[in-house]
Image: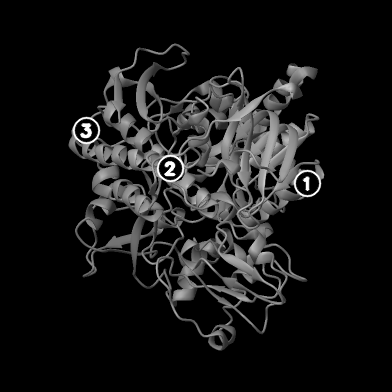
């Protein structure tokens, strides 16, 4: 579930509020959005992909809350890691071009 | 009674074609309708581009070049798995249309990879990229998009033809009405808020709205698809479990368990935890796997697990009719429902036509969304043109019931109703392994839940979208289990423990419908004639 909206990274663009398919966030005037309905989070990671500044973190546990530490997440490179993996963001190229599904299906029994 | 919901609209719009749902099927529908010259509005409960199960995933596509031998293999491969309920004519149509439209995606700039012979490879789509592109394309085609705007009920005219919908913006509270000459339901299937990847927006809303307007369902007994995921996670991507070993807690191998034989996994999970390890993937393939499905590795990387060398607990999450094949009945090649002016596409429509009673996995589902979306958009635009000039003069009324009509003064306990319906459809012993007794008992409780919804009152407008979701889930479960009771055999994904064999006399479709009074009828393959009603479960 979504566990973090980083105060220091967030630029208050509210893109996450707009694009979350299950309406988890609420916008707040002059402040980062709040996680208003955490239990509605479906752990789809779409908010992370659309966040232009890697300010969000979705923990892998989908049925329970966990505590996260922003500094540690940043240090191990997990803030924005999925966005990096799919090649979204400034000066990156979509990794869809590198999709190797054909290699995998070749080896399917 | 919140009568203002159906009378007082801040946003009053007109369209030739209204598309409800912004996933692959909805966006293809909107694009083809707009390309045919129609004025199109697309509304989505979430955000068109991120909503639905395709956006969050890697998607295989049933993309087969027009080579007779390859096409024959593609058609034959799943006929037996689907219990021989599919239709070769529809398969041909879908294969042709999907081939054309996927090539169109390449022209629009989707970055398809090339294979090791340097040829373009177009059988796989990365969901976020695909759906971001679709949103851009429909905007270019002039489609007006209302995001975060769940539709709550359909409108019909004096002749009973569907004439648009009403809804609310769930963030601003703005109430909207779209008056349209034709309407396409592309709201996806129903996974009952199971948190299977990207599936929580899929709560059967379109089925409920369509049924209230008089539409029928087909194949609702084929609704018990479960996806494998790490026990802690939402990521139900099953492809790589082809290279997994499944074990008990003590590390011994579970006999017969595999990604293809999920029933063994389900059986075991009824007694004890099941573990998996992707240890059959050769070293050289592991990098390819990461490049093919980055999202598969996300929960592992974040939980500090190496799935190739470390065992991890797995579970099966219900994907219901999202990967099942049931949905709104399609009456002809235009993807029309049985109600005039109403069309259905993607997971919201029955997929039996190409899959029979067994999910095609991502690839057939993606192909069906593309082609049924394309056809429904084109047909809806043509239908609108055929209505001519007097079309805007119609008197319309909303036909939504639960939550939109007054019940008694009793307040709805929506969350309790949702948990109660989940308790009937999640458990493997009820839905995966079906029995006459189990289905009958579940149906009794589901009928009671429906009655409770009917007799209660919504107290705040904010609550309404969730109440409608709850009602849609209860209605869906009742069509599912009423159909499942009627199919006294094991066919496709419908496993009936009391009737473990396929019965040649039951090679027919089961059509269902109704709200307070749920009914099921059998219908011979390739026929529009219906046999007489067999069961009627009056609440």
Residue at 25 percent of width and 57 percent of height = B269
Which numbered disc flags the more N-terminal residue, 2 or 3? 2
**Discs 2, 3: same chain:** yes
Mark 2 chain = B
Residue A6 shown left or right of residue B53 in the figure: right
Where is B424 relative to B531, above or below?
below
Marks 2 and 3, how far apart at CA: 32 Å
**Residue found at x 59% / y 57%:** A100
- Counting from the top left corner in percent of width and height, residue B359 is at 44, 39
Give the x, y percent position of residue B9: 68, 43
| Residue B24: quadrant of the picture | top right
SS for callout 2: helix
Q: Mark 1 or mark 2: which comes first in sequence?
A: 1
Q: Are marks 3 and 1 on the same chain?
A: yes
Left or right of residue B500: residue B25? right
Q: Which residue is mark 2?
A: B471
Chain identity of mark 3? B
Q: Quadrant of residue B82?
A: top left
Q: Residue at x 66, y 35 (%)?
A: B99
Query: As drawn, is B87 to the left or to the right of A34?
Result: left
Q: Position of residue B104 (x, y in %)?
A: 74, 40
- Per the rendering, the mark at residue B139 is 1
Q: Is residue B259 visible?
A: yes
Q: Nearer the viewer, mark 2 or mark 3?
A: 2
> In what element is the residue under mark 1?
helix
| Residue B125 horizontal/vertical position (percent) | 62, 50
- Describe the element under mark 3 as helix, strand or loop: loop
C-beta proximity under 8 Å, tags 3 and 1: no
């Amino acid at each position: 579930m979504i566990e973090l909206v980083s105060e220091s990274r967030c630029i208050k663009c509210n893109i996450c509020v707009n694009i979350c398919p299950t309406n988890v966030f609420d916008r707040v005037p002059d402040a980062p959005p709040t996680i208003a309905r955490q239990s509605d989070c479906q752990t789809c990671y779409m908010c992370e992909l659309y966040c232009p500044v890697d300010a969000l973190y979705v923990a892998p546990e989908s049925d329970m809350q966990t505590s996260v530490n922003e500094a540690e997440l940043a240090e191990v490179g997990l803030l924005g890691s999925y966005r990096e993996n799919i090649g979204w963001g400034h000066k990156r190229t979509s990794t869809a071009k590198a999709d190797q599904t054909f290699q995998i299906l070749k080896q399917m029994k | 009674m919140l009568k203002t919901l159906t009378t007082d609209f801040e946003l009053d719009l007109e369209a030739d074609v209204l598309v409800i749902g912004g996933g692959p099927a909805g966006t293809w529908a909107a694009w083809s309708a707009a390309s045919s010259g129609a004025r199109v509005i697309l509304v989505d409960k979430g955000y068109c581009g991120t909503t639905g199960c395709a956006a969050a995933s890697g998607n295989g596509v049933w993309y087969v070049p027009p080579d007779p031998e390859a096409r024959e293999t593609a058609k034959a491969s799943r006929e037996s798995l689907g219990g021989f309920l599919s239709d070769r004519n529809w398969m041909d149509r879908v294969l042709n249309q999907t081939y054309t439209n996927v090539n169109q995606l390449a022209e629009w700039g989707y970055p398809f990879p090339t294979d090791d012979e340097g040829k373009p490879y177009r059988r796989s789509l990365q969901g976020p990229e695909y759906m971001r592109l679709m949103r851009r394309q429909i905007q270019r085609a002039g489609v007006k998009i209302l995001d975060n705007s769940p539709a709550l009920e359909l409108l019909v005219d004096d002749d009973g033809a569907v004439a648009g919908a009403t809804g609310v913006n769930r963030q601003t509270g703005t109430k909207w009405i779209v008056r349209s000459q034709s309407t396409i339901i592309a709201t996806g299937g129903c996974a009952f808020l199971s948190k299977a990847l990207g599936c929580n927006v899929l709560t059967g809303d379109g089925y409920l709205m369509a049924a209230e307007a008089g539409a029928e369902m087909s194949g609702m007994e084929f609704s018990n698809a479960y996806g494998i995921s790490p026990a802690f996670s939402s990521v139900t991507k099953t492809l790589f479990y082809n290279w997994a070993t499944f074990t008990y807690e003590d590390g011994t191998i579970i006999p017969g368990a595999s990604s293809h034989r999920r029933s063994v996994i389900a059986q075991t999970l009824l007694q004890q935890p099941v573990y998996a390890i992707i240890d059959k993937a050769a070293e050289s393939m592991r990098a390819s796997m990461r490049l093919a499905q980055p999202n598969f590795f996300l929960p592992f990387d974040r939980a500090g697990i190496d799935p190739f060398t470390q065992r991890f607990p797995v579970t099966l999450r219900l994907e219901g009719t999202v990967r099942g094949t049931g949905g709104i009945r399609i009456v002809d090649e235009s993807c029309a429902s049985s109600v005039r002016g109403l069309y259905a596409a993607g997971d919201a429509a029955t997929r039996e036509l190409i899959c029979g009673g067994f999910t095609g996995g991502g690839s057939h589902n993606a192909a069906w969304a593309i082609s049924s979306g394309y056809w429904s958009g084109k047909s809806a635009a043509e239908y609108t043109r055929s209505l001519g000039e007097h079309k805007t003069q119609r008197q319309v009324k909303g036909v939504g019931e639960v939550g939109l009509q007054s019940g008694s003064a009793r307040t709805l306990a929506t969350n309790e109703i949702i948990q109660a319906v989940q308790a009937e459809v999640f458990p493997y012993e009820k839905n995966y392994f079906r029995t006459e007794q189990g289905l009958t008992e579940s149906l009794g409780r589901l009928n009671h839940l429906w009655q409770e919804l009917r007799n209660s009152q919504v107290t705040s407008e904010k609550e309404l979208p969730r109440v409608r979701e709850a009602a849609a889930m209860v209605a869906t479960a009742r069509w599912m289990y009423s159909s499942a009771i009627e199919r006294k055999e094991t066919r496709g994904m419908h496993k009936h423990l009391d009737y473990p064999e396929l019965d040649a006399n039951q090679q027919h479709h089961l059509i269902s419908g109704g709200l307070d009074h749920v009914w099921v009828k059998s219908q011979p393959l390739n026929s529009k004639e219906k046999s007489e009603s067999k069961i009627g479960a009056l609440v």
